[in-house]
Amino acid sequence: MNTFSNIKELVSALNREQKLLSEMFKKRKSASYKYEYALDLVENDDNRIQYLLSRSVIRQNGNNLEIDDEFLQFFELVLDANEEINTSYINDNLEKVKQNIDYYFNEPNEQRKYEYLRTVKNTLRKLGTITLRNVVDLKRNIDNTFKNEPTFKIKRAKLINLDSKRKDITKLIAQTENLITEDDVTFFNMATDEELRRVIVLLKIQLGKCTHNLIEIERQIIDFLNQIQHQSNVIENCV
């Protein structure tokens, strides 16, 4: 498998094939995107499609094409169109903070000690951003499920599953707040770093915003489930 040698090559390829990739992204929920449709969008130059295939931007299944999962996830993430609630990523970064705090305490060299501190700060920044994004994705998925899923039983099951994701995020927020306020208070006192203090203040604000939104999301899920049950009862009584 070929790979892009640098950012310039990657960006150039995405820019050159923006028309094709835009259409494929719009129709990513369809079962297939025909090869001949793609040819129309690359001026019938098969080499351009083969170039994307060889670098795993897209993949082929028979006469159908799909955007590769890695690129699809990237596009959904940067375009705020993600449908996956990735709580494991929050947990991974939480564990990374704990590990680097431990490394910090056990490292005698000041320069290497600072590198662990820098990693803690960067990871805490990520934690706030990732958690906020997950909450936004969760709310959007709940709205889309309630409005667009036509089958009552599936709609209910999806909402219950999304509520489980809400509970997971709530637990991870509690763990993060515990980490920065209690469990490693010694670290945050010893690592007298002004930037770290600013990072912690911002993170607390972000987590507070997430918690507030999750409370509203819980109410929304309960309301949607009640509406589904009412609609289902009405249909059953009419049969």
Image (tube, grey):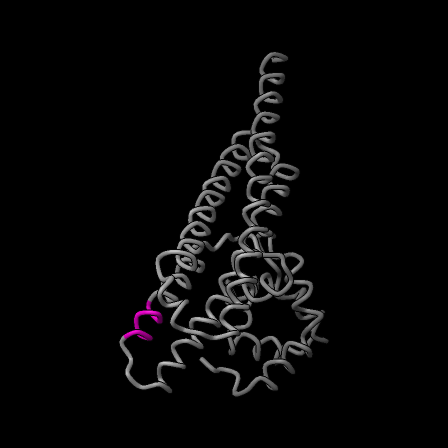
The residue lying toward the viewer, choosing from 105 and 162, is 105
**Who's the residue at 61% across and 65% down the image?**
78
Give the residue displayed 60% in from the left and 39% down from the top. Answer: 216
Instruction: Pinpoint residue 50: horizontal percent, then vertical percent.
Output: 57, 77
User: Was residue 152 drawn as part of the magenta stretch in this picture?
Assistant: no
- Residue 80: name its quadrant: bottom right
Name the residue nearer the viewer: 46 or 220: 220
Give the percent coordinates (x, y) of residue 28: 61, 57
Q: Quadrant of the C terminus?
A: top right
Report whether residue 101 is seen.
yes
Quarter containing the N terminus: bottom left
Q: How many marks are shown on the rendered structure? A: 0
Residue in view at x 49 percent, y 82 percent = 3
- Residue 6 percent across, percent down from the top left: 55, 87
Instruction: Write the start and end of the magenta stretch as one range.
Output: 99-105
Seen at 60% across and 75% down, the residue is 49
Which one is in front, 190 or 112? 190
Compared to residue 225, the image places residue 138 above or below, namely below
Q: Is residue 232 above or below residue 13?
A: above
Residue 133, given in percent of the width and then of the height, sits at: 57, 57
Q: Quadrant of residue 94?
A: bottom left
Q: Quadrant of residue 26?
A: bottom right
Q: Main secondary structure of the magenta part?
A: helix
Q: Is residue 63 visible?
A: no
